[in-house]
Image (cartoon, grey):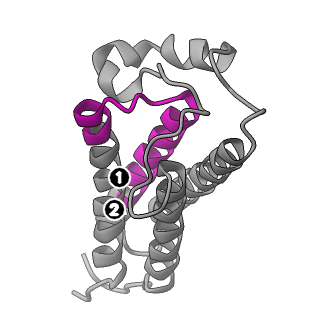
Amino acid sequence: MQYSFSKPWACFGLVISLGALAAALFLQISKEWFPCPLCIIQRYAYLVTALGFLGICFFSRKGVLSTLFVLLTLTGFLAGAGVAFYHVWVLANPAQTCGVDPLQNTLNALPWVQYWPDMFVADGLCTDEYPPLLGLSLPMWSGLGFLALGVVLWVAVRTRRKIKGSW
């Protein structure tokens, strides 16, 4: 049986995604930095990339399932990076706000939110400025996390192999 080199990279991407979610939850609970709707969308994107990387871990050989999980991960990465960098733009232009809007009400009304409200309830404002961590705002850190996930996904896809004759 041959070994696929994409599995360690996919596991690394899974760790990054889950670590970002854990860090967001930690900052919310310990520092009371409440997430806005854009933050919640980024959490969903991290969750999607985590599920995609988990699937790549299990189906690391080239095939239909592996391709579907790569596309799932790519979708989460692109959506999350786009929202993160839009959030950076919103912070740079405080006249623009997402505030309490239909997006927040829609996100909070999703059926699974009631099972883990700390993770998925949006009760902050997008223009709230929290102290920077190592000189960067939280949306900047999130954007860097998504860029790292994009690099990990690219490496994982490039190292997949077509394995013949193995079980």
Q: Is residue 44 magenta?
A: yes
For the question of whether residue 68 can be seen, the reply is no
Residue 31: percent from left, percent from top: 28, 35
Residue 20: mark = 1
Q: Mark 2, residues whose alpha carbon is within 10 Å: few (<14), some, or many (≥20)?
A: many
Residue 15: name its quadrant: bottom left
Who's the residue at 28% across and 67% down the image?
Answer: 11
Residue 115: name its quadrant: top left
Q: Nearer the viewer, residue 88 or 54?
A: 88
Who's the residue at 49% across and 24% down the image?
Answer: 124
Q: Nearer the viewer, residue 164 or 39?
A: 39
Span highlighted in magenta in the image = 26-53
Left or right: 147 in relation to 95? left
Left or right: 162 in relation to 7? right
For the question of whether residue 78 can be seen, the reply is yes
Three-letter amino acid code at disc 1?
Ala
Q: Mark 1, residues whose alpha carbon is within 10 Å: few (<14), some, or many (≥20)?
A: many
Residue 160: name its quadrant: bottom left
- Answer above or below: position of 101 versus 31: above
Who's the residue at 29% across and 48% down the image?
Answer: 23
Q: Which residue is mark 2?
A: 16
The quadrant of the rendering that contains the C terminus is bottom left
The quadrant of the rendering that contains the N terminus is bottom left
